[in-house]
Amino acid sequence: MDDLQQKKWPNVSVIIVNWNGAEFLNQCLSALMAQTLKPYEIILLDNDSSDGSVDIVQRFSFVRLIALAQNTGFARGNNLAIEEASDESEWIALINPDAFAEPHWLEELIAAAQRNPAFDFFASKLLNAGDTSLLDGEGDAYHLSGRVWRLGRGASVMRQADSNREVFSPCAAAALYRRSALCKIGGFDEDYFCYVEDVDLGFRLRLAGYRCLYVPQSVAHHVGSGTTGGRHSHFSVYHGHRNLVWTFIKNMPGILFWMLLPIHILLNIVSIIYFSMHGQGKLILTAKWDAIKGVPKMWRKRLKIQSARKASIMTIWHILDKRFWLANKY
């Protein structure tokens, strides 16, 4: 790689949206301070934390703190921070407070962006912070049923091929986006609050003609759901499974919507059965009922999104995951 002092690097604003992540912040911010490619700025938006997060952030003089008086959620928090980012920044990098970037994380993302001008957003390799021999993800997959998951999650790092490749979208726990692309599609959907909002963002970017590249050389260690109670907490199940429905309604284009709608309905029925068998029946029914109540609003968004679509139906079809068996994806 070219010498950092000689190479002309574009400006990058790194954004962290935090809510009660005090136990992770020192490690997260220290890792950003140790980057081989220094961010143009680091913005941390705090969603009214009550655990002393703000006090920790204030120890890092290089971090620009935006402290809110209420919890606006991950989606709106990122939008607000992006609006506040310097006009000098061509790129926006997102990292979660419970994700700890290795020293070359940002440099590898920007180098990949410069080597691959056909791509406008980029996914990092996420390692399990508790056991770095295991993957936490290699970007996100979107199944033709509307189900989403992180590619390679739980797999042995040694068994995975380390090569750049196109993926559906990045996990926003550690990702890079061309700022102009984010602005063109309007950023995150704030109705989501959190969960699946990054996949929805990725889907809308794809519909607008943008593509995503997985960059395995860019590595972060991720705790995952560090402040929301875990994968199957009431909070994550409710928001995740409500937002899955909205993502399909808004984004699945043209004939694919009607062709795949029966499979999407079947997925939701299976989800209800699965969570009911695991003691969360009332919760999953509430999530799906609230999703249905939101369909009229999401349909209005769909009309706007689809009217501006640039990607062909076949382009979207090719990037969808078509595997039949979805075990352990709930």
Image (tube, rainbow, N blue to C red):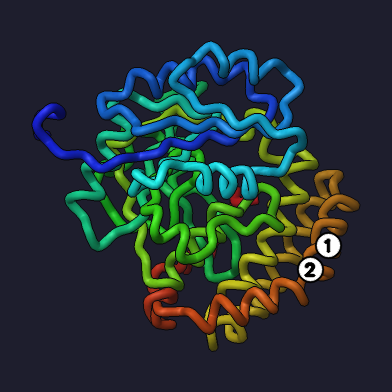
Q: Secondary structure at mark 2?
A: loop
Q: Secondary structure at mark 1?
A: helix
Q: Which residue is mark 1?
A: 290
Residue 129 marker = none
Is residue 195 depicted above or below 316 in this figure? above
How crowded pointer 2 is (Cα within 10 Å; few <14, some 14-19, many 20+) is rated as some
Q: Which residue is mark 2?
A: 294
At 24% from the left edge and 63% from the top edge, which residue is drawn?
118
* Quarter of image, res 298: bottom right
At 49% from the left edge and 15% from the top edge, which residue is drawn?
60
Apparent side of residue 257 relative to residue 71 in the rendered image (left or right): left
Apparent side of residue 281 relative to residue 83 in the rendered image (left or right): right
Is residue 288 depicted above or below 80 in this figure? below
Apparent side of residue 217 relative to residue 18 in the rendered image (left or right): left
Residue that sits furthest to the top in the current view: 59
Which x, y percent locates residue 13?
40, 38
